[in-house]
Every structure is written in structure tokens, then in C-alpha cells.
Amino acid sequence: MDGIKLINFNVFDNGSNGRLTPLEGGIDIPFEINRIYYITQVQKGVRRGFHSHKELQQVLICLHGSVKIMVKTPVAEQVIDLNSLTLGLYIGPMIWREMYDFSPEAVLLVLASRHYDESDYIRDYLEYNKFANKYFGLEE
Ligand code: TYD
């Protein structure tokens, strides 16, 4: 699906000394990182997200447990199961996303290209659809 991609990170496996995964902005992550946040303690049955961003780019990594991410545009929809320390989900601008099925004690890390800005959010799906049709060059 256009606008998203899965990124497999490099792992330095040092046997019993453990594993190390480096994430460098502009190299492993396809933008300079300006903000990091993490989502924890999401109860069973809870669904979050329900928004798109006008310009923000993000990479989501599930550091512990698992979570499903539904990504959607006016022409495509996909569900990604995030359950690996070495897998990142890149989400570009103008992609609707919903996060659900958080396993108990799941830790979802998010790397973001910009500082928090509420005016970058589109939280209404009908409004999203209108903007997205223009953004993706589709007829309304
Ligand atoms: P929100 O983006 O609505 O969460 P989600 O889409 O995952 O359900 O954010 C929840 C609250 O946290 C909201 O009041 C805004 C605040 N917030 C920040 O202050 N800074 C941030 O970087 C983020 C992502 C959210």
C-alpha cells in the first residue's frame, strides 16, 4: 500500500551478551526524529488512533508484546501485526490509522518527524476522506 512501508532493522547479536538495535534518524528511520513517545497499559478491547496527519511521518515499533495497526486510504486498507523488536512500520502523511488488540503489557514506541501539533491532525473520517481524495489525486 502506498504511503506505508515495513522496515527491518539491523540487529547486533552478541549471543549471551544480548542484542542491540540502533535507530539513526535519516538512516534507519527515513526522517530526522523530533519526537518520541510510547503507549502502554492499553486495556483489552480498546482501539485508539482514529486519525490521520497532514504532514507528520512516524515509525511505530512494538518493543514488547504485540499490537495490530490498521492503515487506510480512500483506495486501500491493510492490517499490520507489529510483534517484533526489529520491525518498524513507517506511516507517511495522510494515512488513517487505528491501533487495537494490544497484548497485555504491550509497549508501542513511536518515532515522529515533528513536534506535537494538534493542527496537523485530522480526526474526523469524513474530513479525512475529502482531504485524502485531493492528496492522492482521486475524484471526489
Ligand atoms: P492522541 O494522539 O489522541 O492518542 P491516540 O491517537 O494514540 O489515541 O493523544 C492522546 C493525548 O496525548 C492527547 O491529549 C494529546 C496528547 N499528546 C501529546 O501531548 N503529545 C504527543 O506527542 C502525543 C502523541 C499526544
Image (cartoon, rainbow, N blue to C red):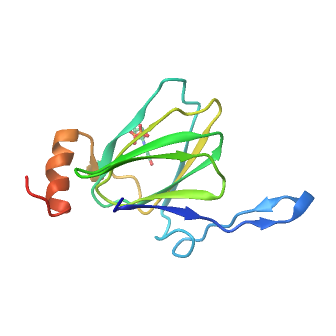
> Which quarter of the rendering shows the N terminus?
bottom left
Q: Quadrant of ligand 1?
A: top left
Relative to 103, residue 35 above or below? below
- Looking at the image, which is closer to me, 120 or 75? 75
Q: Give the percent coordinates (x, y) of residue 11.
A: 72, 66
Q: Quadrant of residue 94?
A: bottom left
Does residue 123 appear to the left or right of 47 in the view shown? Answer: left
The residue at the point 62 percent across, 37 percent down is 106
The residue at the point 21 percent across, 47 percent down is 128
Residue found farthest to the left: 140
Residue found farthest to the right: 16
Does residue 115 appear to the left or right of 93 in the view shown? Answer: right
Q: What is the tally of numbered marks visible in this picture?
A: 0
Residue found farthest to the bottom: 27
Relative to 19, residue 72 above or below? above
The residue at the point 54 percent across, 71 percent down is 25
Q: Quadrant of residue 8?
A: bottom right
Q: Give the percent coordinates (x, y) of residue 99.
A: 45, 39
Relative to 28, residue 81 above or below? above
Relative to 28, residue 89 above or below? above
Q: Give the percent coordinates (x, y) of residue 90.
A: 46, 60
